[in-house]
Image (tube, coloured by chain):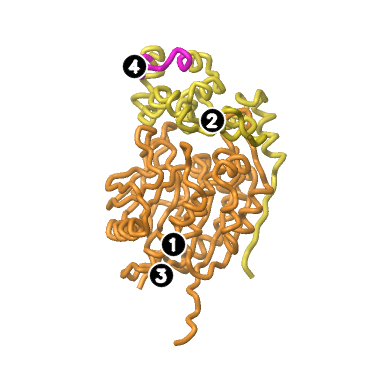
């Protein structure tokens, strides 16, 4: 077995769990709820009654707890896909940089500074 | 006879759409990215393409995980962008080109690809943002759209080679199209970025430069990594480089880079914009 593979046979990448069939199955209800947030009426319905809305989509207890706790890493563990979670994050007033800070345990300023530390602009133009 | 005039490869981050909606193109944070479109605007004004074939990935606007196609080709008379969950919907419609779409579908199936075909389809920010970047303002878009969606969301993803080969098949289809249109090919997304998990905020400039240096003259170099290796190198969203590989495959002539702009960061992303000209090979005899 290669060093980069766990006993599951899956490739291990630090801090990264590729969204595969296992996660897609585990996260289906949570992602279905988040997909519904493309529509403003549904976002409003969630805000008005979070528990009722989660029940309507049959979220698992683990998924409900993660949403209640605004715990992004727990939502991912529960099978949430970040493209769908981003729609929930919008309701909560969080953008992808807020999400990054929450997941890495950094302050928002520190997370932004870490990105800016890569700062580079390289331009090429044909003669 | 149709002509594939060139390719436009660009990041498509939703934050760019928000910056456009808020008029931040000259803002110091955004300007270095938007300035990369000056040569693209000049080229589009000169070439005036009639059709855009856009390789992109849908992020949960048109496709949910209940039915997730590996490859999907739009064949609608018109496409629209809609609210993706954060209240921003670009208003200009995207005129389609169903006859060309069906020609491409016929040809790629003859090349043993098996795409989903969509006569009704929404297109998300991965199409809308590049269009807004290329043709800013409020006028009707001057090109007809053929959208080709690649699954970069739910693993297993198609391999880099498969995406490149799909692009090659599309390129052959474009060459055999009897219409007189001038065509531009788009590849959208990338470069390195990761939104989720403890590695959120991951950027890999070394891999990005490898892609920028090779995608034009030596795209096969990018095929040496499989899709999960690209996730490791570019981040779980950086794997959108698959869209670039497909678009590069569709440029079957002599490919010359006209301009390239790499700017880090915008939002959580190492952003890039590259413009290629696709010159026909010189025939050996008249």
Quadrant position of the N terminus of chain B in the picture: bottom left
Task: Give the quadrant of residue B166.
Answer: bottom left
**Chain hosting mark 1:** B
Residue where numbered disc 2 is placed:
A95
Q: Mark number for residue B23?
A: none
Label 4 or label 2, whichever lies nearer to me, is 4
Q: Are marks 3 and 2 on the same chain?
A: no
Residue where numbered disc 3 is placed:
B3
Numbered disc 4: secondary structure: helix
- Count neighbours of disc 4 (C-alpha within 10 A) and say few if under 14, some if 14 to 19, many if 20 or more: few
Q: Position of residue A125 (x, y in %)?
A: 63, 64
Picture colour for chain A: yellow
Numbered disc 1: secondary structure: strand
Q: Position of residue A103 (x, y in %)?
A: 61, 25
- Count neighbours of disc 3 (C-alpha within 10 A) and say few if under 14, some if 14 to 19, many if 20 or more: some
In primary-sequence order, the first of circles 4 and 2 is 4
Q: What residue appears at the point 54 percent right and 22 percent down from the top-left corner?
A: A72
User: In the picture provided, is B205 more to the left or to the right than B150?
Assistant: right
Q: Are marks 1 and 2 on the same chain?
A: no
In primary-sequence order, the first of circles 3 and 1 is 3
Q: What residue appears at the point 65 percent right and 48 percent down from the top-left corner?
A: B207
Q: Does the magenta run of residues contain B26?
A: no
Numbered disc 2: secondary structure: loop
Picture colour for chain B: orange
Read off the magenta span.
A55-64
């Amino acid at each position: 077995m290669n060093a980069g593979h766990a006993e599951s046979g899956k490739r291990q990448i630090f801090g990264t769990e590729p969204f595969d069939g296992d996660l897609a199955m585990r996260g289906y209800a949570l992602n279905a709820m988040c997909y519904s947030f493309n529509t403003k009426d549904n976002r409003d319905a969630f805000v008005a009654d979070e528990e009722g809305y989660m029940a309507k989509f049959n979220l698992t207890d683990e998924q409900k707890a993660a949403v209640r706790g605004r715990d992004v890493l727990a939502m991912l563990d529960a099978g949430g896909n970040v493209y769908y979670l981003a729609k929930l994050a919008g309701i909560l007033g969080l953008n992808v940089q807020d999400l990054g800070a929450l997941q890495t345990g950094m302050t928002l300023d520190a997370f932004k500074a870490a990105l800016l530390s890569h700062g580079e602009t390289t331009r090429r133009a044909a003669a | 006879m149709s002509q594939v005039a060139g390719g436009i490869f660009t990041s498509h981050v939703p934050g760019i759409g928000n910056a456009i909606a808020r008029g931040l193109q000259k803002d110091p944070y955004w300007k270095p990215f938007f300035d990369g479109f000056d040569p693209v605007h000049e080229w589009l004004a000169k070439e005036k393409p009639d059709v855009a074939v856009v390789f992109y990935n849908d992020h949960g606007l048109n496709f949910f995980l209940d039915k997730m196609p590996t490859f999907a080709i739009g064949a609608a008379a018109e496409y629209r962008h809609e609210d993706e969950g954060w209240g921003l919907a670009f208003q200009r419609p995207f005129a389609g080109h169903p006859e060309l779409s069906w020609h491409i579908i016929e040809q790629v199936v003859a090349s043993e690809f098996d795409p989903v075909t969509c006569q009704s389809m929404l297109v998300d920010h991965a199409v809308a943002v590049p269009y807004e970047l290329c043709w800013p303002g409020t006028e009707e878009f001057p090109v007809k759209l053929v959208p080709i969606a690649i699954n970069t969301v739910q693993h297993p993803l198609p391999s880099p080679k498969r995406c490149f080969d799909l692009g090659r098949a599309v390129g052959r289809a474009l060459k055999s199209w009897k219409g007189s249109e001038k065509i531009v090919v788009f590849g959208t997304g990338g470069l390195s970025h990761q939104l989720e998990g403890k590695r959120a905020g991951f950027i890999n400039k070394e891999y990005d430069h490898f892609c920028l240096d090779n995608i034009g003259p030596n795209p096969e170099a990018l095929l040496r990594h499989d899709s999960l290796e690209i996730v490791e190198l570019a981040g779980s969203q950086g794997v959108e480089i698959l869209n670039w590989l497909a678009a590069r495959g569709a440029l079957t002539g002599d490919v010359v880079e006209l301009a390239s702009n790499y700017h880090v960061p915008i939002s959580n992303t190492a952003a890039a914009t590259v413009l290629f000209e696709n010159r026909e090979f010189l025939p050996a005899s008249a």
